[in-house]
Image: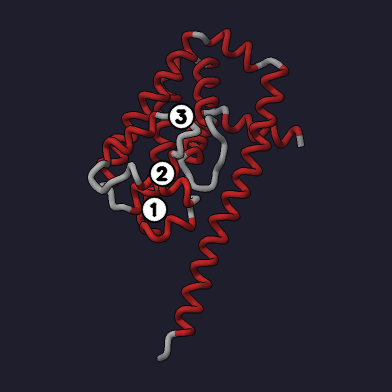
Amino acid sequence: MKDLFNSLLGYFLTPAGVLAMGALDASLIFFLPLGIDFVVIYMAAREPDLFWLYALLATAGSLLGAGVTFWLGRKAGQHGLTRLIKRSTLRRVERRVSSSAAMPIAALGIIPPPFPFTAFVLTSGAVGLNPWTFLTALGGVRLARFGAEAGLAAYYGDGILGLMRSPTFTIVVIGLAVVAVIGSIVSAVAVFRSSGGEDHSRKRSSAATPP
């Protein structure tokens, strides 16, 4: 089990892993608050000359994941969002999202958790925001966020690496990994059940409709 954990962690601490983590971070089923930020900071601290590359990879992955999430929101529509987002969160998000606010809403992507980023992306797709304007603005703010993190990590690299290699930090990482697995499973089950429930309701509605 330890070897498997180290292999998975080691994968995310590679250029391909940064891209994958960025995409997962913006997806509907993955749950690991600040996961992409930790990966960017560690990689930039380890290889300070390539800090710009890790910022770009994280941004590209984030846009990929957000694009899929935006499309899912567009497909679900406003009425379908209640199957994917908790009602309390959805009401709070809907108050700030309008069909003409693509750039301001995307700019909120610079805010780290607990800001409900995925809920905003889903809702933005559902209300019909322009995808190109939204994703362009999102790419800009995400690049600013990851670029700042990577730049600071490159500058303070030795101190950051010393902290991240401590036994205490290892325990924290293991705890976050457990949270990520449990949270991702719960999210995936919720999405699966909501999709299954929708299909079942459609079948019942079709069966009840007279020919």
Residue 174 % position (x, y)? 69, 30
User: Is 86 or 64 nearer to us in this picture?
Assistant: 86
For marks 2 and 3 on the same chain, the one whose residue lies earlier in the sequence: 2
Residue drawn at x 41%, y 44% as measured from the top left: 92
Residue drawn at x 57%, y 52% as measured from the top left: 188
Residue 9: image quadrant is top right
Image quarter hosting the C terminus? bottom left
Residue drawn at x 49%, y 18% as measured from the top left: 44
Q: What's the CA distance linking mark 1 and mark 2?
A: 16 Å
Whether residue 57 is visible, yes or no, is no
User: Is 28 or 49 nearer to us in this picture?
Assistant: 28
Q: Amino acid at mark 2?
A: Arg
Q: Amino acid at mark 3?
A: Pro
Whether residue 161 is visible, yes or no, is yes
Q: Secondary structure at mark 1?
A: helix
Q: Amino acid at mark 1?
A: Gly
Q: What's the CA distance linking mark 2 and mark 3?
A: 17 Å
For marks 1 and 2 on the same chain, the one whose residue lies earlier in the sequence: 1
What residue would you read off at disc 2? 92
Q: Secondary structure at mark 2?
A: helix
Q: Is residue 203 above or below residue 43?
A: below
Q: Which mark is residue 102?
A: none
What residue would you read off at disc 3? 112
Q: Is residue 170 left or right of residue 97?
A: right
Residue drawn at x 45%, y 19% as measured from the top left: 150
Image quarter hosting the N terminus? top right
Residue 36 % position (x, y)? 51, 30
Q: Is residue 174 left or right of residue 145?
A: right
